[in-house]
């Protein structure tokens, strides 16, 4: 991971639609691993950078209204973020301030929280306790029981809202947090690398001979703490998608992951020989340059925060799937060059921001 300064004015605080743009008019930075070349374009220019036979793998998980107002027994208010739906109908939840801007670390085992409409959450035990000291300590994520008077979807439609952080100053309807190809609700936060696709752009890609293949990975809350590895998320890779990935690689075509969630799911089911298999389950895979990337050789992604674990995945892609660039043999230098360009050109970060295509 590398560090850099991110000016606050480059944090996208609203959807591009609120800035007078269509989804596919956000900016697209294209960086080439073989020579460190960087090209600046608009996302609607994406077909010009892909070829017939390339496979775009997309995450069709839909975003939930996962932020719910809650009240403690002492009457104080907070926000609960539903992160991950576990087996046995348990939930991993995150406690946040009432404005949702900062994590709360003072939850207690057995604590009950009142939710709107007569619902309740009971905190049972900290999530990932192996990463805490033996003497205990503050915890942000909790394994909990969620008791609702109606089914989950209807309840979240009535009382929930999309998760948002301090850089998003206004509340936006859930439609702004959905990709156009979302099919199955389950993500706490939007798989945002695919947000800029429009039906018209997908039609142009298919007409060019680019194959689009789906998978599912339901994302949890994205705001990891420094001492937390990526936690488990559920995924499903269909046989047709595994077959498309293998066929593209065998033909010498590119497999383009749309987002870090797609890389995580595909890497979970790709063996050491580079063969991708269908499968479903839970993954806690942490992709580093030392491990490398086996399943994809290109990636469409957003711009990630300084020292983000996602940057390790991007570095692994650059190092593991080809020469980094003529100037350096490391993926970190490739990313440093690209990110310096993005900062200099005023690209926007976060889920409503601009995009980066690594080829």
Image: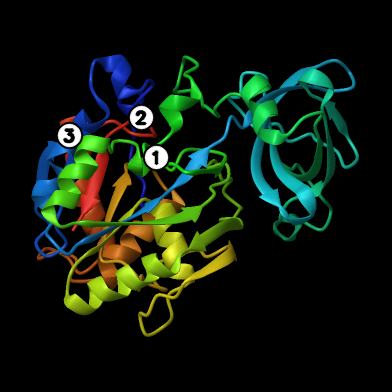
Give the residue at mark 2. Answer: 352
Secondary structure of the residue carrying tag 1 is: helix
- Compare marks 2 and 3 and give the one earlier in the sequence: 3
**Where residue 332 appears, x then y in whole percent?**
28, 59
At 31% from the left and 47% from the top, the residue drawn is 301
**What residue did someone put label 1 on?**
192
Q: Earlier in the sequence, mark 1 or mark 2?
A: 1
Return the residue found at the far bottom: 273
- In the rendered image, residue 305, in percent from the top left (x then y), is placed at 39, 41
Element type at mark 2 = loop
**Residue at 34% in and 37% down:** 195
Q: Is residue 339 above or below residue 285?
A: above
Query: Which residue is denoted by mark 3 in the rendering?
Result: 344
Mark 3 vs mark 1, foreground winner is: 1
Splitting the image into 4 quarters, where does residue 159 fall? Answer: top right
| Alpha carbon separation for disc pair 1 and 2 | 8 Å
Q: Give the quarter of the figure containing the C terminus.
A: bottom left
In this rendering, the answer to whether 201 lies above or below 330 is above
Look at the numbered discs 1 and 2 and tell me whether their residues touch, using CB distance below 8 Å: yes
Left or right, 106 with respect to 162, comes to: right
Helix, strand or loop under label 3: helix
The CA span between labels 2 and 3 is 19 Å
| Colour theme | rainbow
């Amino acid at each position: 991971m590398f560090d850099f300064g991110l000016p606050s004015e480059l944090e996208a605080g609203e959807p591009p639609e609120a800035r007078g743009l269509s989804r596919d008019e956000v900016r697209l930075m294209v960086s080439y691993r073989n020579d460190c070349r960087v090209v600046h374009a608009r996302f609607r220019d994406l077909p010009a950078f892909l070829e017939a036979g390339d496979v775009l793998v997309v995450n069709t998980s839909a975003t939930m209204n996962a932020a719910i107002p809650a009240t403690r027994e002492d009457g104080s208010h907070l926000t609960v973020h539903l992160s991950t739906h576990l087996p046995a109908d348990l939930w991993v939840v995150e406690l946040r301030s009432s404005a949702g801007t900062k994590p709360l670390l003072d939850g207690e085992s057995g604590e009950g929280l009142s939710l709107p409409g007569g619902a309740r959450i009971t905190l049972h035990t900290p999530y990932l306790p192996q990463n805490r000291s033996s003497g205990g300590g503050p915890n942000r994520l909790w394994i909990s029981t969620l008791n609702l008077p109606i089914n989950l979807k209807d309840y979240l439609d009535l009382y929930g809202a999309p998760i948002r952080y301090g850089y998003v100053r206004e509340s936006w309807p859930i439609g702004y947090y959905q990709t156009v190809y979302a099919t199955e609700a389950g993500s706490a936060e939007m798989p945002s690398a695919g947000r800029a696709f429009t039906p018209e752009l997908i039609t142009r890609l298919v007409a060019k001979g680019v194959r689009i293949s789906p998978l599912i990975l339901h994302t949890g809350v994205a705001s990891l703490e420094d001492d937390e590895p990526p936690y488990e998320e559920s995924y499903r890779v269909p046989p047709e998608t595994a077959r498309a990935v293998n066929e593209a690689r065998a033909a010498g075509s590119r497999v383009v992951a749309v987002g870090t969630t797609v890389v995580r799911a595909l890497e979970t089911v790709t063996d050491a020989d580079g063969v991708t298999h269908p499968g479903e389950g839970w993954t806690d895979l942490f992709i580093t340059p030392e491990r490398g990337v086996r399943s994809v050789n290109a990636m469409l992604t957003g711009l990630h925060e300084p020292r983000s674990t996602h940057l390790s995945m991007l570095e692994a892609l650059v190092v593991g799937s080809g020469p980094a660039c003529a100037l350096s043999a490391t993926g970190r230098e490739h990313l440093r060059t690209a990110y310096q360009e993005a900062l200099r050109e005023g690209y926007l970060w976060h889920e409503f921001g601009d995009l980066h295509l690594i080829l």
